[in-house]
Amino acid sequence: MDAREEGVRACNKEAIKSCFDSEKGLLDRRIFVDQDLYDLEMKNIFARAWNFMCHESQIPEIGDYFINYIGEDQVIIVRDKSGEVQVLLNSCRHRGNALCRAEQGNAKSFVCSYHGWHFALDGELIGVPGMSPFYRKDFDKSQWGLVKAAQVDNFHGFYFATLDPDAPSLPDYLGDVGRTGLAMIASRGDVEVVDGIQKNTIDCNWKIAVDNLFDWYHVAYSHASAGEAGVLDLAAVTQANDQMVMLGEYGHAISGPAIKQEMQDEIVGMSDDERKQWNKEEAARSNGRVTRALRMKAAEEMMGPAGARSIGHPNIFPNLWIATGGSQLCLRLPRGPQMTELWWFTVLPKDQTPEERRMTVRFNSHLFGPAGLLEQDDGENWSQSTRAARGVVGGSYPHNLSMALGHDEVKEDPSGQKWIETRINEHGQRWTYQAWMDWMAADSWADLKANHTPVPTGRV
């Protein structure tokens, strides 16, 4: 047993379950810097979960591929010769060399630059130099194809993969809350990802970057400069007293501002043309500031009666953030316990005019991502929060996530959707760390299914 495996085994269930006190909302900071916990996250969370890979618009043709990660395992998402989407480990079965070095492109096959092993688009090993003189024909190529994801599926064109054959189906994994979150984009119609994924690294733990998306408490303070510059109308964006939270199985959650029911009742009676006109007028009135656009009628069916009111941020557990009104996706990719790589995808309706597209891309680039005004504020906070967790004394004091604990009620619609009507709160953060403990303490998918925390009801 190597040192890393010994460390992972040392993270026993009792120790993991002591990391977060859900009754008090207190979180042990060591989960942001501990290497053994990080190694266990790679095994029990990322290698087990359904991970977002890419959108179908990024691999439309046979041979198109895109490089992504499942935890620290780099994978190739490729459309094979039969049109099926494959997710393959980007690691030659001979000596582990990466086959693909480009971030995306089109290929007829994959050839290893180390010794020339040759793989088909479906991962089959089809060529080995020196089969006769070196291997003496004593080699079974059929046993040495590229390692494939255990399951691959898509939801409205968004492809996910899991390395665990025992994982539930993608629809069951997403559940109502995960599907509602992705429908924020899918309900916009036929969409595509803009070429050029913006990537940057921040010296923070990936979980801090995740839980921040539920945090509407920081907006007025951290992003005050954006308000002063006229980029944001902080009061309109934050809507401190009109917040909605949706908590889903396995850690999915949505949290943030919500459309009041009275306004939603008016919106439901509007046609798509009337909504588009309202959006144009609102954009003109905003004078370039962030605004909330009305969704089209498809959203009410795809997102459900409660979900359609949400204009907050969803996170598909573990690390897929849907941001900025459904026009951006962000992956928070772990790069060790104290480093995170952020990937920003811009997703736009195909029927946007060139001018609309230019304006949206420009706006998104200046809001989030490496040049984003808001991300520069956030990244500094995340970095310092992670750094403080390394301290012998400072790291021994817990994070306080007690806001609104025990003060709100879960409501349920006849459709079965559950949500919380509230003010600014920390329900989403607490749910994320409760789910983190469930995943980390589970020995298998069977264990996780049987023992994960049920979606809350009643008072939370």
Image: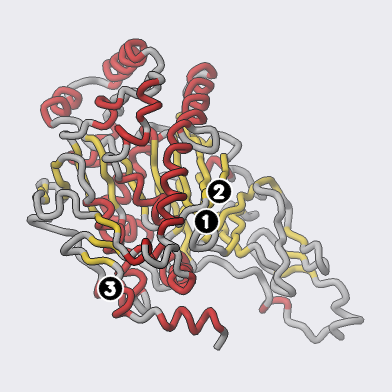
**What amino acid type is highlighted by mark number 2?**
Thr
- Asked if the residue under mark 2 is in contact with the one under mark 1, i.e. CB atoms within 8 Å, the reply is yes
Q: Is residue 377 above or below residue 275?
A: below
Task: From the top left corner, tell me how far across and down residue 340 is, in percent.
Answer: 51, 53
Q: Depth check: give the residue in front, 159 or 329.
A: 329
**What amino acid type is highlighted by mark number 1?**
Met
Identify residue for label 3.
18
Residue 339 has which mark? 1
Q: Which of marks 1 and 2 is nearer the N terminus?
A: 2
Task: From the top left corner, tell me how far across and down residue 266 is, in percent.
Answer: 15, 23
Residue at the limit of the structure toward the bottom, as seen here: 1
Q: Is residue 279 left or right of residue 105?
A: left
Residue at the location (31% across, 77% down)?
Answer: 447
Q: Earlier in the sequence, mark 1 or mark 3?
A: 3
- Helix, strand or loop status at disc 3: loop
Residue at the location (28% across, 73% down)?
Answer: 17
Q: Depth check: give the residue in front, 61 or 112.
A: 112
- Helix, strand or loop status at disc 2: strand
Q: Earlier in the sequence, mark 3 or mark 2?
A: 3
Task: From the top left corner, tell me how far across and down residue 406 is, in percent.
Answer: 10, 55
**What amino acid type is highlighted by mark number 3?**
Ser
Instruction: Name the image quarter holding residue 134.
Output: bottom right
- Neighbour class for label 2 at 10 Å: few (<14), some, many (≥20)? some
Q: How many marks?
A: 3
Identify residue for label 2.
201
Task: From the top left corner, tell me how far across and down residue 425 is, in percent.
Answer: 20, 45
- Helix, strand or loop status at disc 1: loop
Q: What's the distance in space between the residues labelled 1 and 2, CA to CA?
A: 7 Å
Q: Depth check: give the residue in front, 287 or 264.
A: 287
